[in-house]
Image: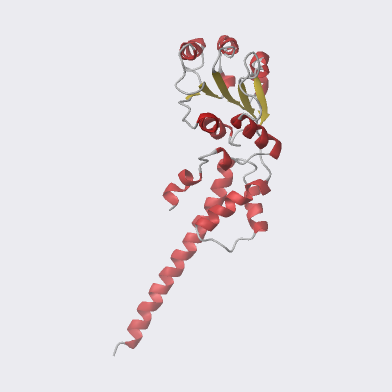
Amino acid sequence: MLDDFENRYTPKTVDDIVFEDDHSRQLIEDLITGARPFPIREGKCGILLYGVPGTGKSALAKLFPDAMEMARAGLNSNSRYIRVQPGNNDASMIQKLQNQANLVPFSTYHYFVLDEVDELTKTAMASLKSLMNAQNCVFVLTTNNFQGIEVGVRDRCHCIPFNAAPPDRWLNLCRRILDDEGILNVSDQTLLKVIATGKGSARDILDAVMSIVIDWNRVLRKQSQNLQIQVKKNKLEVLP
């Protein structure tokens, strides 16, 4: 079971994301469904998720396009995901997106996901700002460095802080994990303390919960071994 632990509990839908507060969750839901008009030509055409590392920005960014397209048209988004990093952060990369934006989208919009967008070169950042004026495009951007994003890019986005969620917001997910593993004897108080050791990092919180599962399985194995030893001992005692 542990060999696929991370895959099983990696967010599969936006509902699986642990948000810092209800306001951020509601804003994302409204943008997805269209309850808040989005995108708006000559207005907001992107979302910028910013905050400390490890809080789920990248996971949400990857899920957002399919969630939005499914809510609007019942289709997959055919989104384009780009991890911005040296060697893939200059104006030529943005030009490829521009070339795609000039084509008719396969879905309702062209969806461009730029992870760690602050890694763009200065020229590429300026090109991105220009590209965001294109029609039929939605941009999903993430950054740990809000100030590193050009003001014009930020102005075209709903800027959503995505920082560490308090431990109680992780409780339902972590409780579900333990329930799935058949671990029912951990109190909420104890589990909250375990969650707190992760300091808001999704990776560290899941690792801490995994430690509970590993320790539990270790105890079960030990009990099983002791039972087997006792059974063998009993058999020997009844032999003539």
* Numbered-mark total: 0
Residue lying at 56% horizontally and 38% vertically, measured from the top left: 14
Residue 204 location in percent, x, y? 57, 43
Q: Is residue 52 visible?
A: no
Residue lying at 59% horizontally and 20% vertically, measured from the top left: 118
In the displayed structure, does residue 237 sit left or right of residue 215?
left
**Foreground: 60 or 4?**
60
In the displayed structure, does residue 92 sit left or right of residue 234?
right
Q: Is residue 192 visible?
A: yes
- Up-down relation of residue 218 to residue 151 (above or below): below
**Foreground: 227 or 77?**
77
Residue 143 location in percent, x, y? 61, 26
Residue 237's image quarter?
bottom left
**Foreground: 198 or 110?**
110
**Of all residues shown, which one is farthest toward the bottom?**
240
Could you tell me which quadrant the C terminus lies in?
A: bottom left
Residue lying at 38% horizontally and 78% vertically, measured from the top left: 231
Residue lying at 64% horizontally and 60% vertically, measured from the top left: 187
**Of all residues shown, which one is farthest toward the front?**
73
Residue 34 location in percent, x, y? 62, 28
Residue 46's image quarter?
top right
Residue 60 location in percent, x, y? 56, 34
In the displayed structure, does residue 36 sit left or right of residue 124?
right
Q: How is the image coloured?
A: secondary structure
